[in-house]
Structures are given as C-alpha cells and as structure tokens.
Image: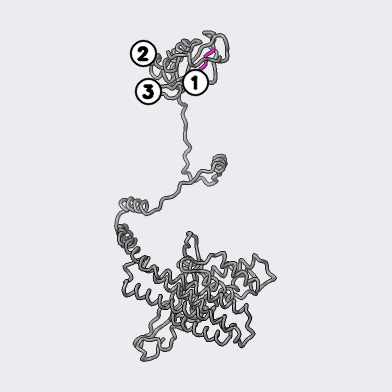
Amino acid sequence: MTEAGGRGRDTLGLATRVKALAVADPVLDLERRKALLTSRDWAGYQMEELALTAIDAVTLKMDFEDGAQHEDIVAAIARVAAVQMPERADDEHTDVARWVLDCLVNVGTVDRGFTHVYGVVRDGTYAAHRFSFKLLREVAGLDGRPRLRATNEAIAVLVGAVDIDIASEQVAADAKLDALVRRGRLVDAKRTADAALRLTAQYAEHIRVQLDGMRRDVRSVDWDRDVQSMQAEALQHIEDRIRDESTIKNNVVTLMENSTEDATPEQAAELIAVLEECLRRHAALQANLQEIGERFRAEQERQTFVPPPRRSRVDLGHQLLEPILELPTKLATPLLAGFVTAVAPPRRPAIVYLPDLLAGLLALPADDDEDDGLIVEPEFDDAPDTTQFADQQYRTVESLLAQADTDGIRLSALLAAARRITGTEAGNLDHLLALHVLGLFGAPRYDPAHDKTLMAIADGSTLHDEIFAGDDLLVIGDPASPTPPEHDNHRREDL
C-alpha cells in the first residue's frame, strides 16, 4: 500500500516488504509441509536451514555461462542434514536433501513458480497485483543436461532484501568490508565478504537476465538506450569493485598485526579466498560484457535472416468448434478427422517382442459368459477339392525329366522345352516343372520306370528367365548310383 497523497508511490515500502515476506514464505513453508509427510519421520531436521543451504550452494556454484549440478547441491544439503541428525542413515539424509531441492524448484507445478498477491494504492484506489517469482530454476547446461540457477529473489533471501539496487549494495558492502579489515575485525569481515560474494552472483544474474532478452528477440532492445548504456555502467561498476576488492585483499595482509580480536592466519586465508572468488567472478562478468557488441551484431544477423513463421495459431473455439457444431455429422466427421491427422505428432511404431508375441498367440481365448446375441455362428459347406495341375501335366513333366543323363540338363533348357509344348497340358506346365526340379535339389529321387536316380545340383550358373530367378540347376540322371556323384562343373554345357 501507499500513504494517502503519495501519488502512487510506495512511500511506506509495504509492497517491498510484502514481496520480501512472499519470497521467504516457500522457505518457511517447508516446516509445515514436513509435518504432512506421514510416511517419513523427519521431525528433527530444520528445513529452513537446509533450504538456505541449497540456495547458498547454487548461488556460489553457478557462474555466468553455466549453472550448478543437481548432484553437487544434493550433496551439500545432505552434509548439513547429517550434522543436524547424525544418528540417521546417509540414505535418509540424501532423501531429505532431494525433497528440499524439489520443493525449492517447485516440482509438480506447471510453470514451477510461486505466486503472491500484494496491493498498491493509486489515486485513492486499492489495486491488487500478482507477484510471481521463482527461487531455483532448471536450465539447460552447456552439455545439454539440466542445471540449477538461483534467481534474484532467491539470492535476496540470503542478503535480506527485495527490489534493491544491487550495484549500490555492492558499494556499501565493500565499504563496510574495508572498514572492518582496517579495524582488524576479520571475523566480521569474513561474514560481510560472504554477503558481498552473494551480491556479486546476484549482479551477474541480473546482467545475464538482461542479455537473455537480446538473445530471444534483438528487436525488443535498443542498442543506444538499453544495451550500450547498461554495458558502460556495468563495466565501470565492475572496474570499481575489482579495484576496491584488490585493495581490501592487500589490506588483509598488511593490517593483520593491528587486529583487535584473536584473529588467526587461517581466518585471513579464508577472507582472502572469498575476495579472490569475488575477483574471479567480476573478471568473468567483465569479459562477457566486453563481448556484448559482437553478440548483439551476431544476434542481429541471425534473427534478421530467420524467416517468420508461416503458420499462425489456431483458435480452437472460434475457428474449429463453433463452425463444426453448425455442420451435420456427415460433413463434420471428415473435417475433424483431417484436423486430428494434421495436428497429431508422428508416433513410433511398436516393436514386436517375440516372447510377448508368442505368449499372446498361445494364450487361451477368454470365456465370454454373456451372450448378447450379436455373435453369428458361421455355416461352412463342403468345398470341392480341385487340383492345380492335371494328370497329363504330371506325365509330361516326368517325360521331360527322363531326358536327364549322366551329363545333365539345365533347368533353363527344361523350361524352354516345356514352353514349346502346346495343347491342353501346356498351361502352367513350366511352374510344375520348376517345382519338381526344386524338389530334386538336395533330395535325390529314384525313378523306377527308367531305373535311374534323378538329382539337381547348383554349380554357380545363374538362371536367366522371364518368370523364375536363381541358380540354373543341373538335373542329372545317374543309373549307376543312388547318391549324387562328384561332377566336374567345368565340363558340363547347357542343353
């Protein structure tokens, strides 16, 4: 809300404080949700501490280009859970950590975001506004796998404010840190340096979000007004931070002897490590800001030559449902079928698994006790047994095969002889002959009428025929042996 006569300004700061409470609510709500898990006995865990540990770990592990891995964050939360409940098993600590992380990501919702309503008085009228935010976001990493990034709202939970000027807060944090170091209070300086490191990560995230708008649509930003001014201001701010933090780092070394507390070299080393991490993050952000010009031109070229989408969205209610309801069923059905066919995605065909197929084929049919009278028992009549080939054709084939001697006769020659026969026994005589020769291949047959053994062998010759394909088998009639003898394939010639 605002004070009366404030002309729409939030002079009381109520909206800012309500947003701060809203951001903290999902963290505080973990204790209430913990009690609803009737199948888990997690009463001894302090979920707010674990949630802040998760946000802190994601903030410190993510950088400008990539986020934090889920496994690292789960391990960090599990370590704190093990300190809270050391008598519990490691598997339970991991389960608690995964549950806390899922709650902060808000797994189970459509947009994985949180929503809170606050109000602002403008011109004497109270207007409600919806504040939507996220604490941890899942984004695609450089390798395509999911990563975690902490939002500005989540980092604000750690630094204690929402809707702040991050750059100004960094200046104030560095000034406070410098004053503490000069007074030799390294313990308090370490705590302030940790807060400054989180502000550094928050400022980098703030810049990255602004640059994301340029990547999505370069036409939504103005180079002079939005990009160039932001780049110049951010580079100047980072240059100041690098200079101040480098000075503070040097002062930690030179002013160790003036400490008014029981400061140790270990405390100084921890403080220097935090300052070096701040310097590293600022250097990385500075390198990215210096490349904004190239990225802007590259995005401008890429997005300029991308053709606009040719298909517009379909209003199912106005463009499809209402016209279909006005049509008779006979005309509406093919239209709906065509629409479903066009919008349905392609489906992978099911892969037949042989054991399942056999089990389904061998399964007994289900007994249907209910006779609804729709099943009609078919009546079958005795069908005459008709033969494909006539007896005369069998005799003709036998006479053709009887021509085979020890030198053999080719299948192609037999087919040509069969096709030269005219009369009633012609027809499909070549098919019957081919079946007989194929039967002699690998299964010699003794012909008692001519006292010889008929066999067919393949010697590598190819059959050139209008109907049949394969090997030009060699049919041999051997009166001396019931088994196929060894033949010299190079001596035989086609008949």
- Label 3 sits on a secondary structure element that is loop
Q: Which residue is mark 2?
A: 422
**Number of numbered labels in the structure image:** 3
CB contact under 8 Å: marks 3 and 1: no
Q: Which residue is mark 3?
A: 466
- Outermost residue to the bottom: 5
Which residue is at a point 51% across and 20% down the rendered structure image?
A: 441
- Residue 186 placement (x, y as % from top left): 58, 83
Q: Which residue is mark 1?
A: 458
Which residue is at a point 38% across and 82% down the rendered structure image?
A: 127
- Amino acid on which the number 3 mark rests in the picture: Glu
- Label 2 sits on a secondary structure element that is loop
Span highlighted in magenta in the image: 453-458
Residue nearer the viewer, 293 or 243: 243
Residue nearer the viewer, 158 or 129: 158
Nearest to viewer (mark 3 / mark 1): 1
- Residue 376 placement (x, y as % from top left): 47, 39
> Is 83 drawn above or below residue 391 in the view shown?
below
